[in-house]
Image: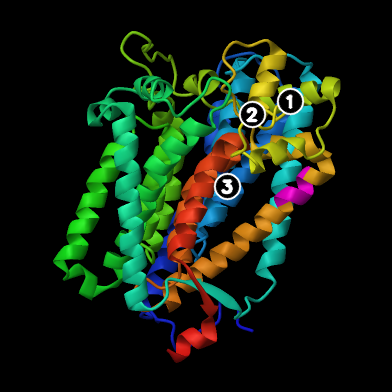
């Protein structure tokens, strides 16, 4: 059994000066980075004018912010690229650390909190427990060596090219159908509101169920993205592919296709983040600088730019001008409702009780129409929003909430420990996939891991029912071009 940290004859080695240079750079960056994430930014938020309440909720939120900031700094400064773990801690630091801290300090939340203040204390405490469980799962995974068992690869070169072309054909056909159904290319550069209205009148969706529209959008966008990622991986690792005009032309065509169906105008911001992150990680598979740049600039972009990035969500009539007196005020009025929604879910469960797996079952069976399953659960965020009496129920339900609603505190901790374990194992296998593959596309994980890393934002924000459709379509596309084979047999070939 071989650990991911071992050196093998097939692994590419780097010059001795490179690690030394980066080690010096890491030491130079470590102090300001840790001070900035753990001390400076939380301190700046804590002194903002507002409610001046310094109760248990405030101190727990401050602890969570510093804890997640420390773990994020560790991910950025690590000598290994940990895609899934790095994105996890970036999300926690931004959406469940800095933003909720600003909300507690300023005394304003994106969504009203209907329960007592103690429910907010419970929610923040449970988030901390879940983060600790994630760390525990990651630690357990790091102490287990990777086995040389069955692997998922792209198969022999000829078979791979055939399957990759098939995926590209599926992508072009599915996206073309999507474009025709919504009324042509021009709709994709208007607004998300216009896209939703076009899908509603396309005949694929019904008033009782969103399954048809979810499949239309999913098949219209996901295969196009995956085909682009695989062709990008091929060009990044094969000189022969870069010299092939047909391969380059297909890549250019896929890039233009994604500019149409996956652009930031007609898609949710979280999905565009998925597209951008997965493409960068795939195009620069061995770049430690790109990995660290994505994590560091992601924090700045999420806090400063992301709240204003919904400019194309509505048309001109429904668009509201963005106004804020400080850089932290948008964190209290937009997007970052994860912690307060957890508190509202605590209040909801106090009156309704736990659902004991029913919500997760609804997410896993997302493809079943409500006409067939009349009692199919709604999104967790929607159910809580309706219980609160809100008209707008497009609310988040972070992964902590989904697990806690079904299984309580122990189930939530166990679930997040499992997520941490799987994330750490996937990160280690990804490191092997991009360093030991050699020339050519190599393991399918070299593309799947960047895609999952980008999609982690959506999975963590929730609700899971909304996220399940594109995840399943992505899995089907991966199965289309994957060959399951013994690694040993693959080496003999």
Between the C-alphas of marks 2 and 3, the distance is: 36 Å
Q: Nearer the viewer, mark 1 or mark 3?
A: 1
Q: Quadrant of residue 147?
A: bottom right
Give percent across and percent down for residue 449.
49, 59
Give percent across and percent down for residue 352.
83, 22
Q: What element carries label 1?
A: helix
Between the C-alphas of marks 1 and 3, the distance is: 23 Å
Q: Residue 89 carries which label?
A: 3
In the rendered image, residue 414 lying in the magenta stretch gets the answer yes
Q: Which mark is residue 370?
A: 2
Q: Is mark 2 on a helix, strand or loop?
A: loop
The residue under the point 58% across, 47% down is 89
Of labels 2 and 3, earlier in sequence is 3
- Above or below: residue 218 compared with residue 81: above
> What type of secondary structure mainly makes up the magenta span?
helix
Q: Furthest residue to the top?
A: 317
Q: Nearer the viewer, mark 2 or mark 1?
A: 2
In-front residue for pair 232/357: 357
Give percent across and percent down for residue 360.
71, 40
- State the quadrant of the N terminus: bottom right
- Above or below: residue 289 compared with residue 309: below
Q: Which of marks 2 and 3 is in front?
A: 2
Q: Quadrant of residue 385?
A: top right
For disc 1, the marked residue is: 345
- For the record, the magenta segment spans 412-416
Q: Is residue 171 left or right of residue 269?
A: left
């Amino acid at each position: 059994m071989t650990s991911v940290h071992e050196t093998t004859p097939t692994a590419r080695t780097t010059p001795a000066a490179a690690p030394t240079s980066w080690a010096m750079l890491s030491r130079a960056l470590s102090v300001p980075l840790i001070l900035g994430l753990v001390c400076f930014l939380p301190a700046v938020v804590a002194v903002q004018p507002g409610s001046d309440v310094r109760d248990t909720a405030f101190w727990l939120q401050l602890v969570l912010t510093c804890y997640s900031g420390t773990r994020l700094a560790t991910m950025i400064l690590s000598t290994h690229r940990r895609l899934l773990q790095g994105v996890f801690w970036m999300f926690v630091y931004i959406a469940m650390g800095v933003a909720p801290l600003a909300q507690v300090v300023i005394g304003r939340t994106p969504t009203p909190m209907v329960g007592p203040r103690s429910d907010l204390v419970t929610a923040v405490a449970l988030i901390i427990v879940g983060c600790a469980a994630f760390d525990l799962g990651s630690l357990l995974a790091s102490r287990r060596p990777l086995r040389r068992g069955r692997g998922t690869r792209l198969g022999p070169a000829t078979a791979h090219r055939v399957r990759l072309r098939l995926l590209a054909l599926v992508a072009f056909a599915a996206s073309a159908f999507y474009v025709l159904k919504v009324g042509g290319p021009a709709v994709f550069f208007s607004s998300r509101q216009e896209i939703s209205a076009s899908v509603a009148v396309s005949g694929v969706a019904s008033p009782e169920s969103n399954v048809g529209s979810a499949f239309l959008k999913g098949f219209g966008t996901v295969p196009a993205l995956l085909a682009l990622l695989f062709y990008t991986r091929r060009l990044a690792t094969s000189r022969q592919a870069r010299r092939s005009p047909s391969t380059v032309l297909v890549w250019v065509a896929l890039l233009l296709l994604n500019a149409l169906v996956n652009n930031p105008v007609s898609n949710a911001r979280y999905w565009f983040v998925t597209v951008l992150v997965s493409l960068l990680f795939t195009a620069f598979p061995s770049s430690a600088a790109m990995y660290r740049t994505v994590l560091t600039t992601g924090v700045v972009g999420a806090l400063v730019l992301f709240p204003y990035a919904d400019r194309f969500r509505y048309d001109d009539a429904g668009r509201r001008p963005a106004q804020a007196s400080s850089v932290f005020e948008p964190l209290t009025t937009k997007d970052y409702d994860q912690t307060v929604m957890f508190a509202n879910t605590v209040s909801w469960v106090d009156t309704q009780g736990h659902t004991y797996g029913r919500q997760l079952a609804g997410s896993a069976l997302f493809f079943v129409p409500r006409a067939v399953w009349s009692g199919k659960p709604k999104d967790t965020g929607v159910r809580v929003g309706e219980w609160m009496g809100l008209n707008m129920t497009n609310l988040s339900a972070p992964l902590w909430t989904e697990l806690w609603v079904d299984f309580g505190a122990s189930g939530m901790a166990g679930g997040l420990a499992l997520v941490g374990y799987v994330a750490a194992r996937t990160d280690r296998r990804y490191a092997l996939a991009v360093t030991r593959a050699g020339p050519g596309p190599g393991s399918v994980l070299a593309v799947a891991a960047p895609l999952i890393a980008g999609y982690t934002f959506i999975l963590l924000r929730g609700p899971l029912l909304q996220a399940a459709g594109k995840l399943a379509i992505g899995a089907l596309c991966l199965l289309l071009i994957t060959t399951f084979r013994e690694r040993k047999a693959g080496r003999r070939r």
